[in-house]
Amino acid sequence: MRILVALTYYRPHVSGLTIYVERLCRALATRGHAVTVLTARYDTALPPEEHLHGVDVVRVPVAARISKGVVMPTIGWMANRLVPAHDVLSLHLPQLDAAGLAIRGRLWKKPTTLTYHSDLILPPSLINAVADATVTSINHVAARFSDRLVAYTDDFARHSRFLSKYLSHVDVIPPPVEMPEPGADALAAFRARHGLTTRRPVIGLAVRLAAEKGVEYLFEALPAILERYPDALILHAGPREAIGEAEYLRKIEPLVERYRAHYLHVGTLNPEQMALFFSVCDVHVLPSVNSTETFGLVQVEAALCGTPSVASALPGVRMPSRMTGMGLTVPPRDARALGEALIEVIANRPKYVRPRAPIAEMFSPDTTALHYEALFERLRGRRQAPPRQAPPRQVQP
């Protein structure tokens, strides 16, 4: 199949959404499909077109930014060229241009799926209120012109203010997660490079510094952790300067400075380095605070490296620990509960560790691509003849 995938930010941008889409696209390409990604040229240093890991990437110039979104005046022209040339269209929200793309999918009779990655929650302001209303309207138009909607979990779909309105049109597909298995020498070198040979426990934090990640609650939980483990260290991997998060960075900086002796930022790491990162951690933490976090792929990445997680008990985010058996969940914005759960997992770590193989199979990118492939084929078949197979698995209202 010729598959056109559209999203706002693609690699090298780093976020859970971009990593999901990159893994999906690479897996689909490996399965023999011709995959094109239509995305924003958010950095002028990036080429307008390139071929990455078997995937064609087409980047549209950005004329302006609205909060975390971008305005691309020529995306319609590019979509008019690309949509007719492909067999199916896979949209990934949040995306300001989703409605126009979905309408083009309907006009050219191309089966269209819409993967909903998260709700959009912006800081309070008049401009953001207008942006939120605009994006919400765009999402609903996109949903009505799409053939099927895709969610990570039933749990999030039922609780999402958006997906809950379309439950009869939702398919649940597990997200793609992969982690290489690091060797002993590489692990020893990573520990030595970052001064981790004697430091314990190590609490992993794999996030960009963004308001929805709730990093302040981890720092607020740190005093209780230090009472039990005076040498505890927060090991942070990920971008410190995320797009649209300058205000949050200013807010969090005093806490970072206060606990500088117990915090180490190792930067944005590639997949091989992330495997080393998770493997040296005693526990991983995801203290997210709202529905912009819908699953938390990093929890599965950590589990594949043998490291349990403590995460907020948000819809969707509470599912990885239930699916893998590796970790605990706590109420969001509750620093005390977060600290207690981290201490519990650190103190009883073997209790929260499970074998790698079943988890790797459950979340293999090839498994995810196989689900998408079956969905695309089913939709293409419906365009050609009445459906004869059993209906797809749906979220129950």
Image (tube, grey):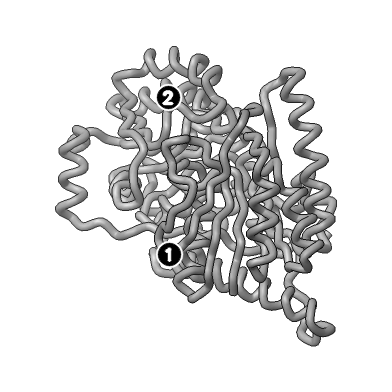
Residue occupying image coordinates x 79% and y 77%: 383
Residue occupying image coordinates x 58% and y 52%: 38
Residue 32 vs residue 294, the one in the foreground? 32
Res. 285 visible in picture: yes
Taking 90 as reference, is 251 left or right?
left
Residue occupying image coordinates x 15% and y 53%: 185
Q: How many badges with numbers are in the image?
A: 2
Q: Residues within 10 Å of mark 2 (few under 14, many from 20)?
A: many
Quadrant of the snapshot with the C terminus: bottom right
- Residue with the mark numbered 1: 54
Callouts 1 and 2 close, C-beta under 8 Å: no
Residue 8 place in picture, x, y as percent: 60, 44
How far apart are labels 1 and 2 at the CA level?
A: 44 Å
| Tag in front: 1 or 2 | 1
Res. 364 visible in picture: no
Residue occupying image coordinates x 76% and y 85%: 389
Residue 15 vs residue 134, the one in the foreground? 134
Amino acid type of disc 1?
A: Gly
Q: In the figure, 243 relative to 281: above or below?
A: above
Q: Which element is circle 2 on?
A: helix
Taking 343 as reference, is 24 left or right?
right
Residue 252 place in picture, x, y as percent: 48, 18
Amino acid type of disc 2?
A: Leu
Q: Which element is circle 1 on?
A: loop
- Residue with the mark numbered 2: 222
